[in-house]
Image (cartoon, rainbow, N blue to C red):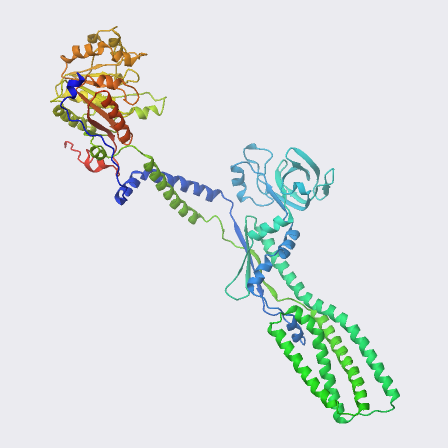
Amino acid sequence: MSEQSTKGQPKPSFEYQQYDDEIDLRHLFAILLDGRFIIGGIIVIVAALALAYVFTATPIYRANGLIQVENNSPGVPGLSDMANIFAAESSSATELHVIKSRLVLGQVVDELGLTVAIKPVYVPILGKLIAKDAIPYQLHSVPFGFSGYAAGGEVVDIAELSVPRNLLEYELTLLVEGNNQFSLWLKNKKLLQGAVGELVSSENNQIDIRILELFANKGAKFTLVNKSRLSSILNLQKQLIVSEKGKDTGIIEISLEGTNTIQISKIVDSVSANYYLQNVQRMAAEAENSLSFLDQQIPRIQQELIRSEEALNDYRRERTSVDLSLEAQAALDRLVQIEAEISTLAINEADISRRFTLQHPNYISFKRQQSNLVSQREKLARTLEELPDTQKRILRLKRAFEVNQAIFLALQNKRQELAILKASTVGNVRILDKAEVMPNIVAPKKSLILALSIVMGGLLGILIVGFRHALRSGVSDPKIFNDNGIMVHATIPLSEHENTPNKHKKSKKTKSHYSLLAKDHPADLSIEALRSLRTSLHFSMLDSDNHLVMFSSASPGVGKSFVSSNLGAVLAQAGQRVLVIDADMRRGYMHKRFCCKPDQGLSEILAGTLDAKQALKSTTIKGLDILTRGKIPTNPSELLMSSQLQSLIANLSSDYDLIIFDTPPILAVTDASIIGAYCGTSLMVTRFESCTLKEIITANHLFDLAGVDIKGIVFNAVEKKASSYYYDYGYYNYEYKAED
């Protein structure tokens, strides 16, 4: 029978065609339009989370202070030249690094005890939110009756905490015992117990703690972490913000952000004070170094002065009287002055070379002055060489004495000046503004976070919608079937009145209810599409060998039973006698649409236990009968291959104008290929965005192997989407209703 039905029938050429990927902005916009509810929902969720964070997050404040770095330190009146010698100009960039150095911040860490981090243990989730606005020294009650938690308003001041190296960075638990008593725990091990104000040590004397103040409810817990000094300094370096106000102004701003306004203010003040102190110490150290150098040189010069004085006196005793001419005396005085200056410069050269490089302008000027004095000395020395030997002898001795005397007096004067300069050093740093906490909250920035959350939610929604669309491999455009040689007999839009099996499978508690759409809603767009299918079948069956129609599919859940039952109802309403047979003896649910029981059906007939006439059930629609699946057999395929099926078809064909078989999917079982061999017209049902083109091609190939000719497909459950082809050209756009 199948051979006769396939003869002379043109078979569609099912070929898989690839399509070039093109960027279609209209299609992309349509995809986003279809997913507008998903995008909107994600935006709402992200915005809600952002709002929850904004209103629950602990506010962060900023404390800042200003300092001024002057180019030169102010000098003491009368000593400005001496002060300028030790004044060192440094750029603001250099001072920024000095402020954040371990030298300065280490003093801050030691002064404020920043190596100890203490946090109260709040009730999970809500505890921190409740304690956010708590005022110190005003204790709150623990919410919901929880014990062992802080509630807000607690004050803890730890003066000293010392732990061994193996416990650094470990969390310790401080438990308030009441009556100024406390205990310290490591996990479940009690380390020590003591009273507030006392230095308490553990049994092995490895842990020491002294708490100055403990204001908290009995049973409250705090976590203590003793950090290493280096890690505390590095952490403060990361948090501290040091910047110059303007360009080359010398005004430096020190700021710090945090939740504890008192602590951040103390830290900024401490940084400013310690930076100022080290600057003064640095300036005083220059004078101290020069004083040490002079203290080494003065005793040596004093000894030379004594020796030269003794030599001069001895020579004068040998020579009763030696007089110098006025010209020689003037030259000697000038030479003595030059020698004293040269010797002073030679003494200061070591200090100058230590402070300046050889290419520094100050060092170059120093060497130029030294060379000029040497030239003058040599010129005067040549003049004095013309004197008699006696005068030259006395001249040399007198010169040595007076030079040493001048040098000694100059060094003594400089030492006194340096001592005064050291005592009066104030540095070149001035604290302009002490730390103040800004009234505005630095973070969280509510408006910015909300705006960013909306943007990020929109981007996330777009990505999700695009990703979902990219993962959909199901066919959404019937043109793809036509381009691959597959005839589309009908395109059926999704009905809002239809309770599909997929919807009910999501919830097992929901009682499945299937109505006959053609009866309850005859004007539905889906029924109009089935009427179009009725017309298409009428003309396609003119050349068929029989009036048997089979509906199958590649995969389950595509709506075969919906199409079969409602098409039968539409044909019956047109005046034809129609029989709908539920041939899915495994999972058929056709009986639910007609509100009858599944037993006494096809399986009993094929098994030979029931007569066909007795199994037929009438429906509420005139001309429409139904044959249910019967009880689920263990061998449905074997029953279909028996002769009983052929006898059933022969007995019923004369009684009906059209017999419709609702069969299971071909890719799952072979039942459809067995029944299709008896049917003159066979169609496959596919679902919008559910079945892939490859599945349809594979299913058709299986039918070809069984000798079943598939006339085409029915494109079912097409949804109204902007990205869908059917949105522009289907029943949705051309709905034609009667006017009241």
- 389 to 685, vertically: above or below: below
Closer to us: 145 or 116: 116
Question: Residue at point 74% right, 89% down?
Answer: 384
Where in the figure is residue 343, as x and y percent of width and height? 72, 78
Where in the figure is residue 1, as x and y percent of width and height? 17, 16
- 415 to 528, vertically: above or below: below
Of the 4 image quadrants, the one containing the C terminus is top left
Where in the figure is residue 151, as x and y percent of width and height? 57, 39
Closer to us: 434 or 476: 476
Q: Does residue 694 appear in the picture of this structure?
A: yes
Question: Residue at point 80% right, 78% down?
Answer: 305
Judged left or right of residue 578, residue 354 is right
- 578 to 27, vertically: above or below: above
- 547 to 611, vertically: above or below: below
Q: Does residue 494 appear in the picture of this structure?
A: no
Q: Residue furthest top?
A: 609
Where in the figure is residue 233, as x and y percent of width and height? 61, 51
Closer to us: 686 or 519: 686
